[in-house]
Image (cartoon, rainbow, N blue to C red):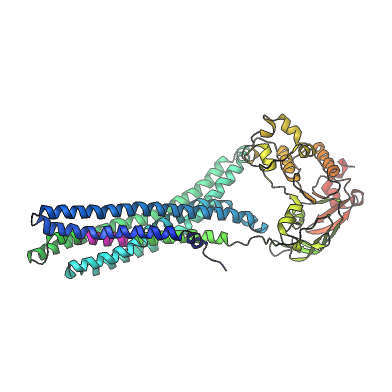
């Protein structure tokens, strides 16, 4: 069942929230008592020229104001602390969720959407938490207290509230309802802008090389203009609300002054009462305005909360406490079917790979090669059939253990902005010299300034494609694996270097099962088994010589250069 995760983050700050509320109550007491004391000072002290009475009331007022100021400072500090901490926990939870969601859900993630969640949406939630902690208790109590004190001063004068309060509430509701639709549009448009910016930055070289700057700029301008127009409409709507309400407040003040003059002339009212009454009316009307603004921000943040909850409720990978036995490397697919949507991407896959075998998988783009190998460690879950490793269903293995022992090096792997050594070891103390020799990455390292401490730029911009792939390969094989799966992970290497790396891997890991996804036939001629995939089905399995009569294999291999 989906639940509001934001509330759960707030629960751990119950004590701080309690202290914050107490301090807000002190503010309220200060706000409500000050006009009464001021009124009493005017009516008794000033009108009777009683200096001692005036001084006494001034001291009392200063004490009350000091208590209110202290309460305001402490409540503001606590509200800021709580809202910032909740924002921290939400960001932390979102990142952990992304790292633990199912592999198929990763494919659906919109990076622009995630960026907006981590920035704009969390900021909106932090703001509303701050305002709620400051105003949720204060505003209702101020409204109740102000109405009560207005009635104690003059029931007749208070009758004006029966007209003014409904008018302000109606105006606020109208403007809030007009503004609400823009909030969801704003966040969705911002998602689109973030995605577009990320896409342009990642493909900036391609854009420049094909002179597509104008096209991309026009595309961005359209999205940016849409965002500006939505914000403009929302701000224009809100900008009309405040002047109208302030105009009503000013008219109310004029009416009160006229009524007060009549009451004073009739001997029913004192000057000090006028001051207090106007002060309470202002407090009351300001609180009503604050209520409408809180309501507006709650609606805005509710959009953000829904978006964040939707991500936090994405299904995570099921990490059971299953089998952790030593894996020899036997693999068996039994009538396996898999689909991303409705149509089968893989069907009727029956396959046996013996432990220590070196197996290649080839096929046209879209034939299901990467999908097939990503079923091995349950990156994707099969629809029908069964996959066994050492005669044990992969579903019975502990998922963390399975991913550790069945090492898949994907074609989309990347490097980080850090030193080469930290990219390889993730800051763990390991001797990497053996592994860099296997991948021939040692030759790259020796040419770099500071060698292993060479700083890799973001996305490996200062490394060639082949250098990045060898770094990624080195990073992967330092782990303790039993089955190694290479998903076209040497496509950027020249044939000579690729063949040397393959030879090194086969020699160094002759006791391991190795699966290599590639269309470079020259690198896999000596493999124990080659699996030819075609449209999600196994077309043929055999050695290189066995497949030379297969037309699909011949077309894939540019066979004349390989024989």
Residue 72 screen position, x and y as percent = 33, 53
Which quadrant of the structure image shows residue 67?
Answer: bottom left
Q: Residue at x 35, y 65 (%)?
A: 173
Q: Is residue 79 above or below residue 172?
A: above
Q: Is residue 422 visible?
A: yes
Q: Is residue 6 left or right of residue 529?
A: left
Predominant SS along the magenta part:
helix
Image quarter of the C terminus: top right
Q: Is residue 141 left or right of residue 524?
A: left
Q: Is residue 272 above or below residue 554?
A: below
Q: Is residue 365 visible?
A: no
**The magenta stretch spans which residues?**
277-289
Residue 337 screen position, x and y as percent = 77, 64
Q: Residue at x 17, y 59 (%)?
A: 39
Q: Camera-side residue: 49 or 412?
A: 49
Which quadrant of the structure image shows residue 273?
Answer: bottom left
Name the outermost residue toward the right. 545
Q: Residue at x 44, y 60 (%)?
A: 15
Image quarter of the N terminus: bottom right
Q: Is residue 281 left or right of residue 323?
A: left
Q: Is residue 271 magenta?
A: no
Q: Camera-side residue: 64 or 212?
A: 64
Which quadrant of the structure image shows residue 538?
Answer: bottom right
Residue 552 screen position, x and y as percent = 84, 52
How many labels were placed on the picture?
0
Residue 352 screen position, x and y as percent = 86, 58
Q: Camera-side residue: 36 or 132?
A: 36
């Amino acid at each position: 069942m989906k639940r509001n995760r934001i509330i759960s983050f707030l629960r751990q700050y119950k004590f701080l929230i309690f202290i914050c509320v107490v301090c807000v109550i002190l503010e309220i007491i200060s706000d409500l008592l000050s006009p009464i004391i001021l009124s009493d000072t005017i009516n008794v002290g000033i009108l009777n020229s009683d200096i001692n009475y005036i001084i006494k009331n001034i001291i009392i007022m200063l004490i009350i104001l000091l208590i209110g100021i202290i309460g305001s400072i402490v409540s503001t500090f606590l509200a800021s602390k709580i809202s910032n901490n909740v924002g921290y926990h939400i960001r932390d939870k979102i990142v952990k969720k992304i790292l633990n969601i199912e592999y198929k859900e990763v494919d659906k993630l919109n990076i622009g959407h995630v960026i907006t969640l981590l920035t704009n949406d969390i900021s909106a939630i932090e703001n509303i938490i701050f305002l709620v902690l400051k105003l949720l208790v204060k505003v209702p109590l101020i409204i109740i207290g102000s109405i009560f004190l207005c009635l104690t001063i003059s029931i007749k004068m208070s009758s004006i509230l029966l007209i003014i309060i409904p008018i302000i509430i109606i105006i606020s509701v109208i403007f809030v309802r007009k503004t609400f639709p823009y909030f969801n549009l704003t966040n969705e448009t911002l998602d689109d802008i973030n995605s577009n910016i990320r896409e342009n930055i990642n493909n900036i070289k391609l854009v420049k090389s094909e002179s597509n700057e104008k096209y991309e700029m026009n595309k961005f301008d359209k999205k940016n203009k849409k965002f500006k127009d939505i914000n403009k409409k929302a701000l224009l709507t809100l900008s009309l609300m405040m002047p109208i309400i302030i105009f009503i407040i000013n008219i109310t003040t004029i009416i009160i002054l006229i009524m007060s003059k009549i009451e004073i002339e009739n001997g029913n009212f004192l000057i000090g009462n006028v001051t207090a009454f106007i002060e309470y009316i202002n407090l009351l009307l300001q609180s009503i305005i604050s209520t409408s603004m809180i309501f507006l921000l709650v609606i805005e943040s509710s959009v953000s909360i829904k978006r964040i909850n939707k991500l936090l409720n994405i299904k995570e990978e099921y990490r059971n406490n299953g089998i952790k036995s030593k894996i020899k490397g036997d693999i068996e697919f039994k009538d396996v079917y898999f689909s991303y949507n409705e149509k089968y991407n893989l069907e009727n896959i029956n396959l046996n790979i013996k432990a220590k075998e070196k197996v290649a998988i080839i096929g046209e783009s879209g034939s299901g090669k990467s999908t097939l190998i990503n079923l091995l460690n349950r990156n994707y879950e099969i629809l029908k059939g069964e996959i066994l490793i050492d005669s044990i269903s992969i579903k019975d293995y502990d998922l963390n253990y399975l991913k550790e022992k069945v090492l898949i090096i994907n074609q989309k792997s990347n490097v980080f902005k850090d030193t080469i050594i930290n990219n390889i070891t993730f800051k763990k103390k390991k001797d990497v010299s053996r592994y860099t020799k296997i991948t021939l990455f040692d030759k790259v390292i020796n040419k770099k300034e500071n060698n292993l401490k060479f700083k890799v730029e973001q996305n490996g911009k200062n490394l060639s494609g082949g250098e990045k792939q060898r770094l990624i390969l080195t990073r992967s094989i330092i782990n303790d694996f039993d089955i190694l799966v290479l998903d076209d992970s040497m496509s950027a290497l020249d044939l000579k270097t690729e063949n040397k790396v393959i030879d090194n891997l086969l020699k160094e890991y002759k006791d391991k099962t190795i699966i290599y996804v590639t269309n470079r036939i020259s690198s896999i001629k000596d493999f124990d088994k080659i699996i030819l995939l075609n449209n999600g089905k196994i077309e043929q399995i055999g050695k290189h010589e066995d497949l030379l009569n297969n037309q699909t294999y011949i077309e894939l291999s540019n066979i004349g250069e390989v024989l």
